[in-house]
Amino acid sequence: MLKDVLNKSGKAFLLGNEAIARGALEAGIDLFSCYPGTPSSEIGDTLSYACKELKNFVMEYSVNEKVAVEVAAAAAFAGMKSMCAMKHVGVNVASDALFSLAYTGVSGAMVVVTADDPSMHSSQNEQDNRWYGLSMKIPVVEPSSVQEAKEFTKFCFQVSSKYEIPVFLRTYTRLSHASGVVNLSPLPEKEFERKNWIKNPKRYVVLPAHARVLKAELLDKIEKISASFSRWSGNWIEKGDGNFGVIACGLSYAYVKEACEDLSINPHILKISTPNPLPRDLILDFLVEVDRVIVVEEVDPILELQVKALCCEEKLNVEVHGKDLLPSSYEYSVGIVEKAIAKLLNFEIKEVETEDVAKIAPPRPPIFCPGCPHSASFYALRKAVEELGVNAAFTGDIGCYTLGINKPYSAVDTCICMGASVGIGCGLSYALKDKVIAVIGDSTFFHTGIPPLINAVHTKRNLTVLILDNSTTGMTGHQPHPGVESYGCGEGSSVKIEDVVRGCGVEFVEVVNSYSVDKLKDALKRAIEYEGVAVVVSRQKCAILRRREAKAKGKKLKPYRVNEKCNSCLKCIDEFSCPAIFLDGNRVKIDPVLCVSCGVCKRICPEGAIEIT
Ligand SMILES: Cc1ncc(C[n+]2csc(CCOP(=O)(O)OP(=O)(O)O)c2C)c(N)n1
């Protein structure tokens, strides 16, 4: 639990992400920065809480992952211990900085948490960020349990500080969101102290002449780190019987242990917690004991390819298996690993009949919350397009509002990555005869929506941009963004979206309350008909926050109800999607428990049949 993260000692029941946060606190972190994204978000949420309580380090929710990395790197340039966290695709955004930071290294210590998402529980792709470690030449450390999540975070700080290099801690959904009992070590007594700037341009200015020297130093560091990883207790060999071996990384190690128990076999096992650089000497020690191995790792064959290369290099006659028997997509399970090992060993295993949970659980399609302002915005957008009688391409973006893809709105035609609604909108405005309308959330706008908007102005695109401002990063758990005052451990100043938009050179800018659907529809109609870039900011606080704030103030939100004037035209159900409105037989009703009193249904009812209770 969140507050247990600050326990002095003993044991605590922690989420994987809380254990990572605790590891950073035990290591004596000075600065933390992040941009939220599942499955990494609770690291930031925990350290935001810890920062306000302990007041001995600083933290911020940065505007995007690249800035988060730069903020953390700067602190480490100044000799501090810093950490930043992001989801796997966040590393794509930060990668420009990270490739060069491997060269410069750091004077203090810097840990970068990459939270990968095998099976894509809440992501647009399944990229395996261990590749980044390999290509950037940044060490990657990967825990297999909640306890290891804490210990390995501390280890990352040690490696970073010793070799003066940023270090990736790779976590993943099954670990970040698992809970377990963790043995705590004491939190260090420390203050937050600013440092004196020590100039070192040969290191921190990556001019080609400097970079060439730094590259050679980086290769040398990586070789030394590989040797030290062979001696580190987080990588180990478990001696078994015979000459068959298993190499496992991350959570696959736990699956391998269980699978071997089920199959009653005792192979040699090599647990690898450092997919980059590999503990080469330890792997060679392992390979001389076996003549057949299977490498068990989720997603890509990163260890497998390197182990095969090592066998060739060292002329070892070892048969190496992996992705020939195991899938390259989605999470593994004990069953999947067991089947692969059994196939390799020619074991017969009984197929256990398991009930398909997906078939027995009632379907729960994701829907907008009751009173969600995005729902009102999409209603107004559809009406505007319908009333103008135009064809439109809707370029969407990532956030709660991606749900606008569903009926009755069907107003998301593309969704690629954060900020792409405006960039793809620019491209489509060259290619299509139709109107192009980009829809983007407030946090996403600050994250990567501004450069493509400048692009649209500069290239004189005909583009309507609808910015959905609910004053929060809703999708990932209500983290602040530059549009609000808080930045995670303090009050800053809020940046107004409409000021930024005007500053980008947009002349048509209107700001409307999302719940005023008629006004919003009219503003959108004007925007769609406008020649050039037109921006409408639809503003209303996220309904969950409204409900929470009302509760905190002891205010009751008065629910709406349907009166006798209702003629069951069903416009409130067919054209507007609110989970509080339902059909009881052929009567429309409003669930008073779900209703947050937004009043949108009252405004769209043609019969005046909806009223406040
Ligand atoms: C590069 C990247 N970083 C983080 C995420 C995780 N993520 C998805 S949507 C989103 C922001 C959503 O906030 P906002 O745009 O305000 O829309 P809301 O969910 O509040 O409607 C985030 C952080 C991501 N998908 N990609």
Image: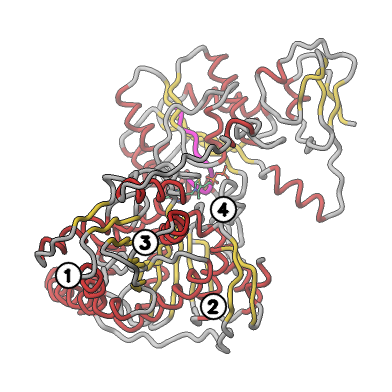
Q: Determine the secondary structure under disc 4.
A: loop
User: Looking at the image, can residue 114 be seen?
Assistant: no
Q: Earlier in the sequence, mark 1 or mark 2?
A: 2
For mark 4, what is the residue? 483
Q: Residue at x 75, y 24 (%)?
A: 603
The residues colored magenta run 437-444
Q: Quadrant of the N terminus?
A: bottom right
Q: Earlier in the sequence, mark 4 or mark 2?
A: 2
Nearer mark to the viewer, of 2 and 3: 3
Q: Are marks 1 and 3 in contact (CB under 8 Å)?
A: no
Q: CA distance from mark 2 to mark 3?
A: 26 Å
For mark 2, what is the residue? 25
The amino acid beneath tag 3 is Cys
* Foreground residue among 281 and 38: 281
Q: Earlier in the sequence, mark 4 or mark 3?
A: 3
Callout 2: few (<14), some (14-19), or many (20+) C-alpha neighbours within 10 Å? many
The amino acid beneath tag 2 is Leu
The amino acid beneath tag 1 is Leu
